[in-house]
Amino acid sequence: MYNKILVPMALDHGVSEQTIKIAQGLSGGTGEIIALHVYEAPQRSVAAYLDEAAVKESMATAKSNLAEKTAQYAGVRAELVQGHSARTIIDYAADNGIDCIVMGSHKPGLSDYFLGSTAARVVQHAPCAVHVVRDRP
């Protein structure tokens, strides 16, 4: 069993519910589960055309959506951080003593045929065990 499990959540994909349920099983009912959404700020070239209030509103919406998706799961703490998805997940795991990451993988392209690109990077560089759940159509 794992003591501290990180569940990265892409709010626009359906695999999140599966990953939380798997994390609950892996925790044995006693471990801490953190649902993490990484908000990726718009690229600089795009950000130049966006109002700062619009970016803040987008982050607030993401935070609200994360809270809504995780509210039904007892013992799951929701967190939203800003950064690059893969790098932020890896750093968060290292900085917070995470001993397992449970994440989804979906819609792979040719360069990442077996795993999604974020999942592939996390598997390669995470400081802990990583369980990957494939999103089935």
Image (cartoon, helix red, strand yellow):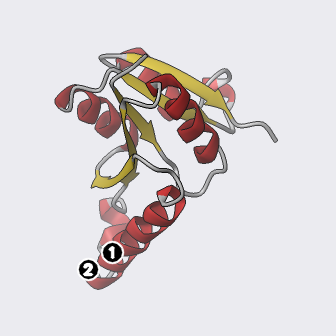
- Quarter where residue 56 is shown: bottom left
Which secondary structure, mark 1? helix
Amino acid type at mark 1: Val
Q: Position of residue 110 (x, y in %)?
A: 68, 27
Amino acid type at mark 2: Glu
Please tell me the numbered disc located at residue 52. Answer: 2
Q: Is residue 28 visible?
A: yes
Q: Is residue 49 visible?
A: no
- Quarter where residue 1 is shown: top left
In the rendered view, would you say 61 is above or below 25? Answer: below
Gap between marks 1 and 2, in whole Å? Answer: 5 Å
Task: Classify residue 55 as left or right of residue 20.
Answer: left
Which secondary structure, mark 2? helix
Q: Position of residue 77 (x, y in %)?
A: 35, 50
- Quarter where residue 91 is shown: top left
Judging depth in this view, the residue of 90 and 133 nearest the camera is 133
Q: Which residue in the structure is indicated by mark 1?
A: 55
In the rendered view, would you say 125 is above or below 62? Answer: above
Task: Classify residue 30 as left or right of residue 20.
Answer: left
Residue lying at the far right of the rendered structure = 137
Q: Position of residue 31 (x, y in %)?
A: 36, 30
Q: Residue at image x 50%, y 66%?
A: 68
